[in-house]
Amino acid sequence: PNRLDSQGSQEGERLVWPRQNSLSLREWDIPYDELSISEPIGNGRFGTVFSGNWHGSVAVKVLNMEYLDDEKTLEAFKSEVGTFRKTRHENLILFMGACMKPPKLALVTSLCKGLTLFTHIHLRKDKFNMNKTTNIAQQITQGMGYLHSRGIIHKDLKSKNIFLENNKVVITDFGLFNVTRLCHGNRKCSGLSIPPGWLCYLSPEIIRSLRSSDNDDLPFNKASDIYAFGTVWYELLCGEWPFKEHPPEAIIWQVGKGIKQSLAHLQASKDTKDILMLCWAFKSSERPDFVQLATTLGKLPKKRLARSPSHPVHLSRSAES
Ligand code: ATP
């Protein structure tokens, strides 16, 4: 009889796993011709995102092929697809499949109808009340906690990668960082290339590892995702990024030394600010995990809405949304 090993898999299973893996990867392959591609939604470092149709509305993220001429990027892409197909959580984007035959590499996911937190906070300057802010943060911790429990590091958690759809948080772009980096890294440029809005999500240990020539092995781990969550929590609370208007060199120097954004101007309870300080702890071992964060967020006092018999419940609810 087969025995279970320490990872819970059966003896013998490991021998056939690589074949099973490539077979199941094939199950997610979508022939490019089956997709009907319509409007471009926007460009990112990875390539262009289009809205399209494949058995209903989808988002098609087409990899920028300009720099893709090596096996390494294709392998990184397939490995990310392998990661993606393991994710099933209501706060994570629904992965539907991928076009894996060069020269057309694309990821097909559900199409988010809502706006990103980036658009809400930085473009529309929307203000969320504290109950809603906490609720959004809790949903992020749930989706991220699930990813971490599956051994997946997001590596690029930021307000641009978090959609809000009818009050539901949907996190995207997890694990795609390696592909993005390879697409980007092939470009011949000298000096440290820092996409705008990236630095304030990077933990001190990552900032200290940035190199002008080669950023292949940045030490992303669960704790660096927690640091990035801290920055999203700050954006939700303040409506802006930490170290706003500081030049990149100043951010690198301060964060690398353990200097944090001052919270003096932030009108929030001590518990709320403590979450920021914990997530931004200089030592990665001192940062909480997403399960602990979910509990801490759940303990923040909820503002009760004044209700009176003459004030119907549905009216007070709509005031909250
Ligand atoms: P970066 O590459 O720096 O992470 P980004 O997040 O804006 O920037 P992409 O993730 O490539 O880049 O997204 C490009 C555009 O497409 C953005 O406006 C994004 O909000 C939108 N988008 C991405 N995925 C979806 C989706 N599943 N549904 C709807 N819109 C999407």
Image (cartoon, grey):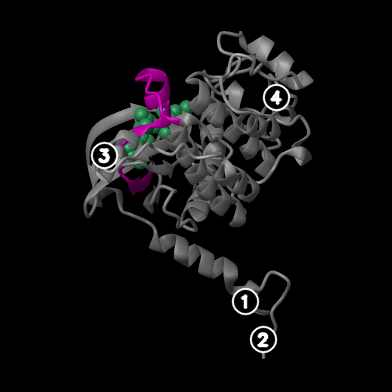
- Relative to the observer, which residue lies in front, 274 or 246? 274
Decide which of tag 1 and tag 3 comes sooner along the chain: 1
The numbered dot on residue 39 is none
Of tags 1 and 3, which is closer to the observer? 3
Specify whether tag 4 is near ligand 1 (CB below 8 Å): no
- Which residue position is annotated with label 4? 207
The kind of secondary structure element at disc 3 is loop
Marked residue nearer the N-terminal end (3 or 2) = 2
What segment is highlighted magenta in the picture? 106-129
Q: Is residue 254 visible?
A: yes
Q: CA distance from mark 4 to mark 2?
A: 46 Å
Mark 3, Cα crowd under 10 Å, few <14 / some 14-19 / many 20+, is: few
Distance from the alpha carbon under mark 4 to that under mark 3: 52 Å
Q: Which residue type does callout 2 highlight?
A: Asn
Residue underneath mark 3: 311
Label 4: few (<14), some (14–19) or many (≥20) C-alpha neighbours in 10 Å: many
Proximity of marks 2 and 1: CB atoms separated by less than 8 Å? yes
Q: Secondary structure at mark 4?
A: helix
| 242 is within the stretch colored magenta | no
Alpha carbon distance from label 1 to label 3: 62 Å
Q: Is residue 8 left or right of residue 309?
A: right
Quadrant that contains the C terminus: top left
Residue assigned mark 2: 2
Disc 2 crowd rating (10 Å Cα; few below 14, some 14-19, many 20+) is few
- Vertical order, 190 against 309 (above or below): above
The residue type indicated by label 1 comes to: Glu
Image coordinates of residue 67 in percent, x first then y, are: 47, 30
Q: Is residue 189 left or right of residue 119?
A: right
Choose between 21 and 251: the one closer to the eye.
Answer: 251
What residue is disc 1 on? Answer: 13
* Nearer the camera: disc 4 or disc 3: 3
Q: Residue at x 66, y 46 (%)?
A: 289
